[in-house]
Amino acid sequence: MPHIADKDGIHYIGGCCGSGVAMMSYLGDIAARKALGHAYDPTFEVPFKRQPFYTGDPWFMPAIIATLELRDRLRV
């Protein structure tokens, strides 16, 4: 589900997952109106959910990247 959230004055848009340019343009307009203090449609204003066991440090990314690189090399 596409949604908008903000934290510390920074506005975030996420969850579009292939729903296209129209949805991102619409959500960008809503985020801009919200940031400027204008009236906006709060339909998509849903807080982002925290991921379990994730503290903000992507310690797992090197292992994922190495795995994907190896998989790419083996497919050649």
Image: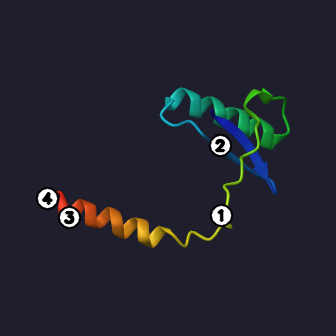
Q: Residues within 10 Å of mark 4 (few under 14, many from 20)?
A: few
- The structure residue drawn at horizontal position 27% and vertical position 67%, both measured from the top left corner, is 70
Query: Dot 2 corresponds to which residue?
Result: 13
Circle 2: residue type: Ile
**Between marks 1 and 2 in the image, the one whose residue lies nearer the viewer:** 1
In contact (CB < 8 Å): disc 4 and disc 3: yes
- The structure residue drawn at horizontal position 63% and vertical position 32%, both measured from the top left corner, is 1
- The structure residue drawn at horizontal position 48% and vertical position 68%, both measured from the top left corner, is 61
Query: Dot 3 corresponds to which residue?
Result: 73
Q: Earlier in the sequence, mark 3 or mark 1?
A: 1
Query: Dot 4 corresponds to which residue?
Result: 76
Measure the alpha-carbon separation of dots 4 and 2.
37 Å
Circle 4: residue type: Val
Q: Residues within 10 Å of mark 2 (few under 14, many from 20)?
A: some
Measure the alpha-carbon separation of dots 4 and 3.
6 Å
> In the picture, residue 47 is in which quadrant?
top right
Kindly identify which numbered label has been placed on residue 54. Answer: 1
